[in-house]
Image (tube, rainbow, N blue to C red):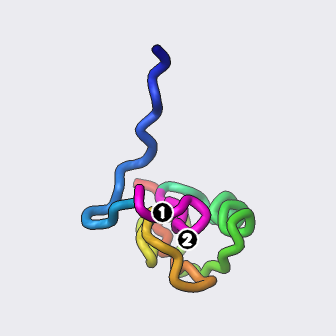
Amino acid sequence: AAAVAAGPPRPEGIPTDTVPAAERVPDFSGLGLGRALEVAQKVGLRVEVSGSGLVVAQEPAAGSRRTGPVCQLRLAPPQ
């Protein structure tokens, strides 16, 4: 039997299995700005960015239901 990838960890309290994939906010964590913008464009989100480096925080949370067309990303230099 083939193993099934579990995917990224789910944010606490958000049952992503009840949110259709097309309505979920992608996980931007660890991405550089260019890659984050590509992912956002693919799923039809606009991003508001603060900082530079890699994504360390986002609102709404990854895996949560999209509530609008904007996702806020906070970037910080890699550690």
The residue drawn where x is 53% and y is 62% is: 20
Determine whether 59 is above or below 22 in the image: below
Main secondary structure found in the magenta portion: loop
Q: Position of residue 67 (x, y in %)?
A: 51, 83
> As rendered, which of 68 and 38 lies closer to the eye?
68
| Residue identified by numbered label 1 | 77
| Residue identified by numbered label 2 | 52
- Lower sequence index among marks 1 and 2: 2
Q: At numbered mark 2, what does the secondary structure look like: helix, strand or loop? A: loop
Q: CA distance from mark 1 to mark 2?
A: 6 Å
The residue drawn where x is 47% and y is 73% is: 65
Rendering quarter of residue 59: bottom left
Q: Position of residue 34 (x, y in %)?
A: 69, 62
Determine whether 50 is above or below 8 in the image: below
Give the left or right position of residue 78, taking residue 49 as reference. Answer: left
Does residue 54 belong to the magenta stretch?
Answer: no
**The disc labelled 2 sits on which kind of residue?**
Ser
Q: At numbered mark 1, what does the secondary structure look like: helix, strand or loop? A: loop
Name the residue at the left extreme: 13
Q: In the image, which residues are magenta? A: 17-29
Q: Are marks 1 and 2 in contact (CB under 8 Å)?
A: yes
Q: Position of residue 8 (x, y in %)?
A: 42, 48
